[in-house]
Image (cartoon, helix red, strand yellow):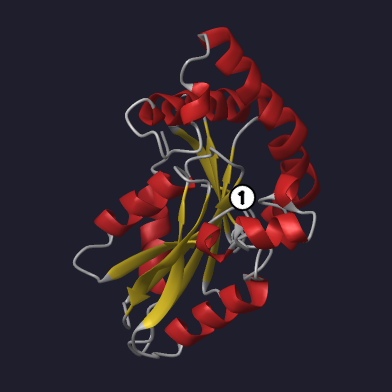
């Protein structure tokens, strides 16, 4: 089985030149495992200092999205402040100290007002999100795409949907709290509806096309293990 994580870590180390921060983008569909992959990559790259930032923080807040008629298009390209996101990566990569990134909460389903993640000249900046490649391709040193079948992605999304609802049982402030009393089949139906009407559309129209921008494509099996790794420099699976 190909170790995609180790291969990506090797590519990151190859791009470290002159002490400049290496900017890595990890894209893929909703529920493809971007956050987990980014966190594991940070661990593998130790002792390098690695900061992981999600592009979710650069979504416009719900009030802005609602005013613009975009609330149901959250995650689509026009729901992000792409200029702010790009400026953030450029500043970190240039060595600007204490660059602030806004923070998003899946619990409240919104950007957290007044909360920021401060990034101070790391060795590696990992930016993960559905638009990490489409919005940032020109300012990244390494572009990674996590690939999986649509059926697997839907199954993973529904599983995550159940997890969010379960967590909300102990948090009445959660966006998902109102779903907690629903029977499992109703929760599953809602999850599949959201996937097919929103996330699958976004995947086909915007996220999957960004795969062509990747330097490295990590293809995953149903159980999240890595099936193969494709590198642009070699034009073949390795």
Nearer to the camera, 112 or 136: 112
Above or below, 155 against 99 in this view is above
In the image, what residue occupies the spot 25% across and 55% down? 43
Q: x and y percent of residue 234 in the render?
A: 59, 59
- The picture quadrant where one finds residue 22 is bottom left
Q: x and y percent of residue 50 in the render?
A: 31, 68
Q: x and y percent of residue 49 in the render?
A: 25, 71
Q: x and y percent of residue 61 in the render?
A: 60, 60
151 vs 20, left or right, is: right
Q: Tell me if residue 77 can be seen.
A: no
Furthest toward the left, the residue is 47
Q: Tell me if residue 120 can be seen.
A: yes
Nearer to the camera, 30 or 165: 165
On-image quarter of the N terminus: top left
- The picture quadrant where one finds residue 153 is top right
Q: Which residue is mark 1?
A: 236
**Secondary structure type for disc 1:** strand
- The picture quadrant where one finds residue 70 is bottom right
In the image, what residue occupies the spot 34% across and 89% down? 97
Dot 1: few (<14), some (14–19), or many (≥20) neighbours within 10 Å? Answer: few
201 vs 36, left or right, is: right
Nearer to the camera, 123 or 195: 195
In the image, what residue occupies the spot 31% across and 77% down? 123
Above or below, 66 against 160 in this view is below
């Amino acid at each position: 089985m190909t170790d995609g994580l180790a291969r990506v870590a090797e590519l990151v180390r190859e791009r470290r030149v002159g002490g400049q921060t290496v900017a890595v983008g990890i894209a893929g569909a909703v529920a493809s495992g971007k956050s987990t992959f980014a966190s594991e990559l940070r661990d593998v790259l130790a002792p390098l200092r690695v900061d992981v930032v999600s592009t979710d923080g650069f979504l416009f807040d719900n009030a802005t999205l609602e005013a613009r008629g975009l609330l149901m298009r959250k995650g689509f390209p026009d729901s992000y402040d792409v200029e702010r996101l790009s400026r953030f990566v450029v500043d970190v990569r240039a060595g600007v100290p204490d660059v602030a990134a806004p923070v998003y909460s899946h619990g409240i389903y919104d950007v957290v007002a007044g909360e920021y993640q401060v990034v101070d000249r790391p060795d590696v900046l990992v930016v993960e999100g559905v638009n990490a490649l489409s919005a940032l391709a020109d300012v990244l040193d390494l572009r990674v795409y996590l690939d999986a079948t649509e059926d697997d992605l839907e199954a993973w999304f529904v599983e995550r949907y159940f997890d969010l609802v379960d967590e909300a049982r102990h948090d009445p402030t959660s966006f998902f709290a109102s779903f907690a009393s629903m029977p499992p089949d109703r929760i599953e139906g809602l999850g599949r509806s959201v996937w097919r009407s929103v996330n699958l559309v976004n995947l086909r129209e915007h996220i999957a096309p960004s795969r062509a921008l990747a330097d490295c494509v990590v293809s995953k099996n149903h159980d999240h293990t890595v099936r193969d790794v494709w590198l642009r420099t070699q034009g073949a699976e390795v």
